[in-house]
């Protein structure tokens, strides 16, 4: 549990640095550190699926933000600051790597499901009572459409919104402007 609090303090410090710094690239890197710290916390809380999703979102977000930042804010590091920045970056990366390795030690062995170790897990109740509660002969369907229906509705809403947003951004023709009738 101490590692949980260390990661939490790390994320709070990174958030303060991201808010207070004047350098855009440093702020973006601190935001990325917060996201990767969050993914390590998800691993610590035994939610590897959410941790993987967080890492994917974080990498995509960082690529977009760094690309936007580099085009707006050209900063060059020279002299002694370059050495200090390199050493500080290597130390921080090493600490994050060690925290990740420590969290990976707490995960169960590969192929050993966590839910099988705990009789009070929701998955055990789904398997034991799924047929009686829902009447569905397919357990996956009963979980997906009965037990987790609101979650499924939320996921479908997020996907629908993402498709509509991507379509609006990536469309080839823009709307006709009132002052420009030729379009």
Image (spheres, rainbow, N blue to C red):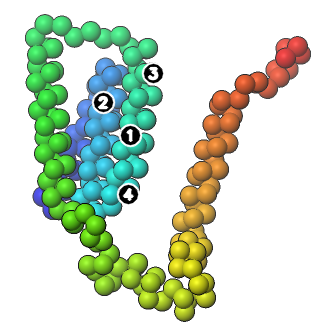
Q: Quadrant of residue 1?
A: bottom left
x and y percent of residue 41 in the render?
Answer: 26, 54
| Local SS, label 4 | helix
The answer to whether residue 130 is above or below residue 6 is below
Q: Quadrant of residue 23?
A: top left
**Among numbered discs 1 and 2, the one appearing first in the sequence:** 2
| Local SS, label 2 | helix
Tell me the crowding category of disc 4: few under 14, some 14 to 19, or many 20 or more residues within 10 angstroms, Cα based: few
Q: How many marks?
A: 4
The answer to whether residue 80 is above or below residue 40 is above
Q: Which residue is mark 1?
A: 58
Q: Which residue is mark 2?
A: 29
- CB contact under 8 Å: marks 4 and 2: no
User: Which numbered mark, 4 or 2, is in the foreground of this view?
Assistant: 4
Q: CA distance from mark 1 to mark 2?
A: 11 Å
Q: CA distance from mark 2 to mark 3?
A: 13 Å
Q: CA distance from mark 4 to mark 1?
A: 14 Å
**Among numbered discs 3 and 4, the one appearing first in the sequence:** 4
x and y percent of residue 21 in the render?
Answer: 28, 25
Furthest-bottom residue in view?
132
Q: Which residue is mark 3?
A: 68
| Local SS, label 1 | helix
Residue at horizontal 57%, vertical 60%? 154
């Amino acid at each position: 549990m101490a590692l949980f609090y260390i990661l939490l303090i790390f994320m709070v410090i990174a958030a303060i640095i991201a808010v207070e710094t004047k350098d855009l690239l440093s702020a973006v890197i601190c935001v990325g550190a917060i996201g990767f710290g969050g993914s390590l916390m998800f691993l610590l809380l035994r939610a590897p699926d959410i941790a993987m999703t967080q890492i994917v979102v974080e990498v995509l977000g960082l690529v977009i933000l760094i690309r936007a930042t580099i085009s707006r804010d050209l900063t060059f590091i020279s002299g002694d600051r370059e050495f200090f920045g390199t050493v500080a970056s290597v130390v921080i990366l090493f600490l994050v790597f060690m925290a990740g390795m420590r969290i990976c030690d707490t995960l169960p062995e590969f192929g050993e499901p966590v839910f099988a170790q705990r009789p009070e897990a929701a998955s055990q109740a789904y398997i034991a009572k799924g047929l009686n509660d829902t009447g569905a002969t397919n357990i996956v369907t009963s979980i997906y459409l009965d037990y987790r229906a609101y979650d499924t509705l939320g996921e479908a809403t997020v996907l629908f919104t993402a498709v509509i947003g991507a379509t609006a951004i990536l469309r080839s023709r823009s709307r006709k402007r009132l002052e420009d009738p030729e379009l």
